[in-house]
Image (spheres, rainbow, N blue to C red):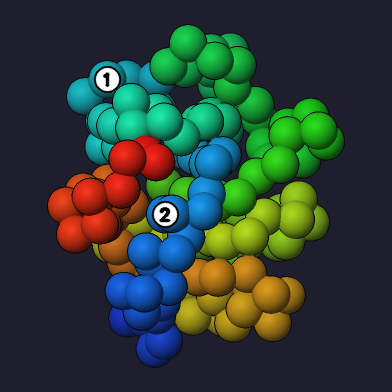
Amino acid sequence: MGDQSCEFPLSNASVAEIDAILATAATIAVVGLSDKPGRDSHRVAAYLQAHGYRIVPVNPGAARILGVPSYPDLAAIPPGVAIDVVDIFRRPEYIPKVVEAAIERGARAVWMQLGLAHNAAAERARAAGLAVVMDRCIKVEHARWLAASGSPRH
């Protein structure tokens, strides 16, 4: 993620909270989703899509990713699309803006991918009622949750 320094999460979601997010989410907006199949963001989103989640790509440089329309930012996603989780694949300096947009969109959770944490943005999200996961890979956590729960939902 470049040489921008990343913070250490001072507070993070528990395993039970992560499991609840994964169990109840239906739609995940992936901010910074690459249209290049070799990128982590693409592999993670493709995995989630294959496991039944609706993926909404957010990338101003692509019209479609993973067979669905991509949007330049969270605000451009049609209002009728309820976003459960905003999964962030952006450098740390962009996280506060993404978190503010997630709050505006009415997302239920923000997820900062492995290697990403921003404590001030996390506190802002929590104060607005969002669940927050930092420095964790949603694909890895989903695989763990699926193996532990045996849930057929996703």
As drawn, the label of residue 153 is none
Residue 4: x and y in percent read: 35, 62
Residue under label 1: 37
Q: Looking at the image, which is closer to me, 62 or 48?
A: 48
Whether residue 37 sits left or right of residue 78 in the image: it is: left
Circle 2 residues within 10 Å: few <14, some 14–19, many ≥20: many
Q: Nearer the viewer, mark 2 or mark 1?
A: 2
Q: Is residue 118 above or below residue 94?
A: below
Q: Is residue 149 above or below residue 127?
A: above
As drawn, the label of residue 22 is 2
SS category of the residue bearing label 1: loop
Tell me the amino acid under the disc marked 1. Pro
Looking at the image, the residue that sits furthest to the bottom is 10
- Quarter of the image for residue 71 reads top right
**Which quadrant is the C terminus positioned in?**
top left
Q: Is residue 63 visible?
A: yes
